Image (spheres, rainbow, N blue to C red):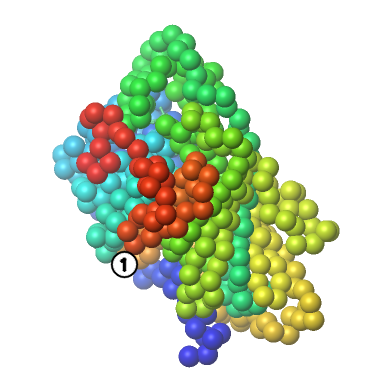
Amino acid sequence: MQRREFMRNAALAGAGLLIAPRGLFGADAPSNRLNIALLGVGGRGKAHYDTLGTQNVVALCDLHEGNLAGGAKKFPKAKTYLDWRKLLDDHKKLGLDAVVCCTADHHHALIANGCINRDLHCYMEKPLAITVEEARSVRANWLTKKSKLATQVGMQRHALSNFNRVRELILDGAIGELKSAAAWGNRKIPREGYWPAAGAPPKGFHWDLWLGPAPDHPYNPGYFANTGTARGNCTQWNMFWDFGVGQVGDMGSHTMDLLWNAVDAKLPTSAEAKGEKFNPDVTPVECESHFEHPANGWRGPLKTSWYQGGAMPKSPKEFIDLNKIDHGVLYKGSQGFLVASFDNHVVLPYGKEADMSYYKPRAKDQLLPPVGHFQEQWLAACKNPSLKTACDFEYSGDMIEQMLLGLVAYRVGKRLEYDGAAGKVTNCPEANALLGRKYRAGWSLNG
Ligand SMILES: NC(=O)c1ccc[n+]([C@@H]2O[C@H](COP(=O)([O-])OP(=O)(O)OC[C@H]3O[C@@H](n4cnc5c(N)ncnc54)[C@H](O)[C@@H]3O)[C@@H](O)[C@H]2O)c1
């Protein structure tokens, strides 16, 4: 097979998209609707209301009674729960098919496994997990059921057409052979440490359920933007190690997705990182992590990097100010650079071949098919699991496992050699101790 033809086929396969046979699930006829539960009804959950409204929302869960009541107004037929474990226990009674999860991050992997173990399709808001062990557990679990369960991680920018265009340019050789790719994000949310005790939680807000699997901490409204309610915003609590992984789980998940979509990488063989001084309470603002990957069928060995909170890759040209792109990716190839934001890109060929005669753009009819509506792509796959989703738990699990391994490398301050098949660091025992976390009694990763 010609290299170009091989790359095009790889592009189509990697994009993981099949066109749905029309009429198979058709419009959302009442008989063809899914019974869905929404976990985490306020906040990000609201962004899913319209799409979920096309199905039967049979259950809602929120540990904030006010937020739960707000959701119940929108979906009056749904049974309401404060504790997602009880809702999942009732899945048969509810006739549940699928779950959309918008809770705080430290519950995500537990809920994802809870869904897979009960044969429920799952849409999980990003990040899929907050430890390496969690990412591995969810991915491994799903891979045993991938032919019957549809999964998607909420990295909805993936549906922007620029994701496909960047992938096509890289695969078709617009910058020659891909050598490295670096993603960055400039969001900065500094915190000093866990908040001190500050009175009782507001009435109707179940702080103990919010803590869930995390170690005990006293309540403080600071975790919720000092609003005194549970409706803050993820950026108020995701910087704390027990509740999130800072920028890795925040904008980093979206931006690394732009990189990951174009490089066809699996787990790295090494990780190293550096950043500001380690704080045992709070994830770093400024940090950079670097990874090595073996060659695959269409490129040689690859280096990937993640920069956050002020750390930045070097600009390829003095007239390009990467700082003007809040969240972007710089790809380096043997013939040039490609700089991408979420919705646009620029190619910078260098040297003698700057005429780009080495590159033949693909014909229009060979362009990758659009993802379409991101949540609807998952709904369609729930109804016909032979349809792929763009950000399933394998693609997204690999991606977040690498990012989380980078945080472990940052914590130990050493270059780590990683055996991805075994999920073990082979040269640093203290790093292996940081791949997972302990859960409070009553909460388990694989329940
Ligand atoms: N894909 C995106 O672009 C995007 C955007 C924003 C947030 N998010 C993700 O959505 C999730 C929620 O973020 P947010 O900003 O809405 O947070 P938030 O704290 O503002 O709201 C979360 C809502 O879920 C409820 N909740 C939290 N933990 C719960 C639990 N264990 N059980 C039941 N209810 C629970 C809260 O009471 C609240 O109503 C996060 O994982 C975040 O990363 C994704």
Residue in front for this viewpoint, 45 or 303: 303
Farthest-out residue, top: 199
From what the image shows, is residue 112 above or below residue 370?
above
Q: Is residue 77 left or right of residue 241?
A: left
Farthest-out residue, left: 93
The image position of residue 397, as x and y in percent, is: 40, 54
The image position of residue 168, as x and y in percent, is: 58, 72
Residue at mark 1? 386
Quadrant showing the C terminus: top left
The residue at 61%/37% (across/down) is: 276
The image quarter containing residue 365 is bottom right
Residue in front for this viewpoint, 412 or 139: 412
Is residue 128 among the parts visible in the rendering? no
Residue in front for this viewpoint, 76 or 327: 327
Q: Is mark 1 within 8 Å of ligand 1?
A: no
The image position of residue 216, as x and y in percent, is: 35, 22
The image quarter containing residue 73 is top left
Q: Is residue 292 left or right of residue 27?
A: right
The image quarter containing residue 277 is top right
Which amino acid, mark 1? Ser
From what the image shows, is residue 97 above or below residue 79?
below
Is residue 419 among the parts visible in the rendering? yes
Q: Secondary structure at mark 1?
A: loop
The residue at 70%/76% (across/down) is: 335
Q: Is residue 283 left or right of residue 134?
A: right
The quadrant where ligand 1 appears is top left
The residue at 71%/72% (across/down) is: 336
